[in-house]
């Protein structure tokens, strides 16, 4: 990364070179050289360590006056920054051993399609629900926001809807096509996700995008919105579809109540769990687990039979039910990822090894023919 080196640190020049190098994230920390994430791996640049003056110049470049005032008072804050004709960034400011640090995530101007992301075409079917909750889950950096953006823009292109997004901060910027889109940022346009959903219901919405379901209050607001005839799209930081259900029910201390469990299951339309991993030849590939709440899945969930849910997903021949291992196996079978990568990202390595060895004679492409 020697081409990133500059004699005098210039933020926008650095970001332009990082963008050209294919960085998805940029890390700045006072006293350290900047680092980049490229194809899922952290790369240290050859730049000199950032001085206190360098970091202060970066802050005054990227932060507006009100944001800068909040930074002076806070140890954690999220905001956005834009380099014209390059891209936008989601920025997080925090402290690292008392020293300031910035993490900048690339948000491209152009919203990619599901096809361009090489995601299962079945995800397009989930945009056709008129109500209910669809969740995209996965660890940080797994592409949840990008997948949701592709799904939302598909609605925008194909349906005459009013879409309201509530984000922290606003990331992708949409252009009205067939739909009308209202974008609201936390701390600027609304106080919390929960209050944003509450007031969105008075703004004639059809679809509500909630940046993240973090707590019971937001979940209850999302359930209420879906019960009153709205489609709610959101994210959660969970690693599998079953774990997502456990997390949702865990928000309710009285989860033994049949009514609460039934409300959750009745409003949930699908959960999508995804992981990004290195692709052969460079770039990233997405493995995607899909659990659509069919009548059979709903029945198992209401009874708490989560093992039976997984078995049903495992045996399914249809794209609406796909396990993570099946998706990994498909990527491996099509030569998109290496075997060691598939095993590294699997949460059930023994099962995947058996699939690879052909012990599961029924191992198949569970994505309906798509290369994820």
Image (cartoon, grey):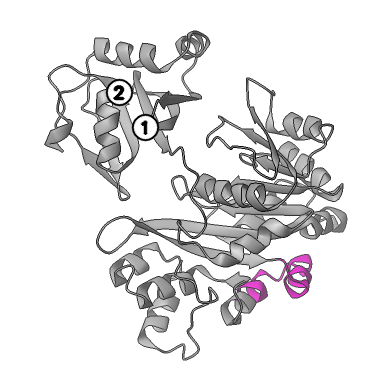
Residue corresponding to mark 2:
12
Query: In this rendering, would 309 be left or right of 52?
Result: right
User: Which image quarter: residue 162?
Assistant: top right
The spot of residue 39 in percent (x, y) is 30, 50
Is residue 247 at least partly visible in the picture?
no
For residue 269, above or below residue 335: above
Splitting the image into 4 quarters, where does residue 222 fall? top right
Residue 161 numbered mark, or none: none
- Residue 191 coordinates in the image, percent (x, y): 69, 23
Residue at x-position 46% and y-position 45%: 140
Check the picture and name the quadrant holding the N terminus: top left
Q: Which residue is drawn at 37% across and 32% down?
A: 86
Going from N to C along the chain, the mark reached first, 1 or 2, is 2
Q: Which of 305 and 79 is in front in this view?
A: 79
Residue at the spot of label 1 = 86
Instruction: Give the SS element for disc 2.
Output: helix
Secondary structure mostly seen in the magenta stretch: helix
Question: Would you call the spot at circle 1 few (<14 residues within 10 Å), some (14-19), or many (20 or more)?
Answer: some
């Amino acid at each position: 990364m020697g081409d990133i080196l500059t004699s005098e640190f210039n933020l926008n020049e650095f970001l332009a070179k990082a963008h050209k190098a294919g960085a998805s994230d940029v890390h700045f920390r006072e006293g350290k050289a900047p680092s980049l994430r490229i194809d899922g791996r952290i790369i240290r640049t050859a730049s000199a360590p950032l001085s206190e003056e360098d970091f202060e110049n970066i802050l005054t470049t990227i932060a507006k006056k009100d944001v800068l005032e909040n930074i002076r008072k806070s140890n954690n804050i999220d905001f956005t920054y834009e380099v014209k004709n390059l891209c936008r960034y989601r920025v997080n400011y925090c402290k690292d051993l008392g020293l300031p640090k910035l993490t900048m995530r690339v948000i491209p101007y152009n919203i990619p399609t599901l096809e361009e992301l090489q995601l299962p075409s079945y995800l397009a079917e989930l945009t056709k629900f008129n109500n209910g909750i669809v969740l995209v889950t996965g660890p940080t950096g797994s592409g949840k926001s990008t997948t949701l953006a592709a799904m939302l823009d598909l609605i925008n292109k194909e349906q005459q809807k009013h879409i309201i997004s509530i984000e922290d901060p606003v990331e992708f910027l949409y252009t009205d096509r067939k739909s009308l889109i209202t974008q609201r940022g936390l701390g600027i346009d609304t106080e919390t996700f929960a209050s944003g959903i509450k007031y969105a219901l008075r703004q004639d919405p059809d679809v509500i995008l909630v940046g993240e379901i973090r707590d019971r209050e937001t979940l209850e607001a999302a359930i209420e919105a879906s019960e009153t005839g709205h489609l709610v799209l959101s994210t959660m930081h969970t690693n599998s579809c079953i774990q997502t259900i456990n997390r949702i029910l865990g928000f309710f201390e009285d989860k033994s109540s049949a009514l609460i469990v039934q409300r959750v299951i009745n409003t949930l339309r699908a959960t999508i769990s995804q992981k990004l991993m290195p692709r052969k030849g460079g770039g990233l590939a997405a493995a995607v687990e899909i659990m659509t709440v069919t009548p059979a899945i709903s029945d198992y969930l209401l009874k708490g039979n989560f093992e039976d849910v997984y078995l049903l997903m495992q045996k399914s021949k249809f794209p609406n039910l796909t396990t993570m291992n099946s998706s990994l196996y498909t990527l491996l079978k099509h030569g998109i990822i290496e075997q060691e990568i598939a095993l590294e990202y699997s949460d059930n390595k023994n099962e995947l090894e058996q699939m690879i060895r052909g012990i599961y004679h029924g191992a198949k492409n569970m994505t309906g023919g798509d290369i994820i």
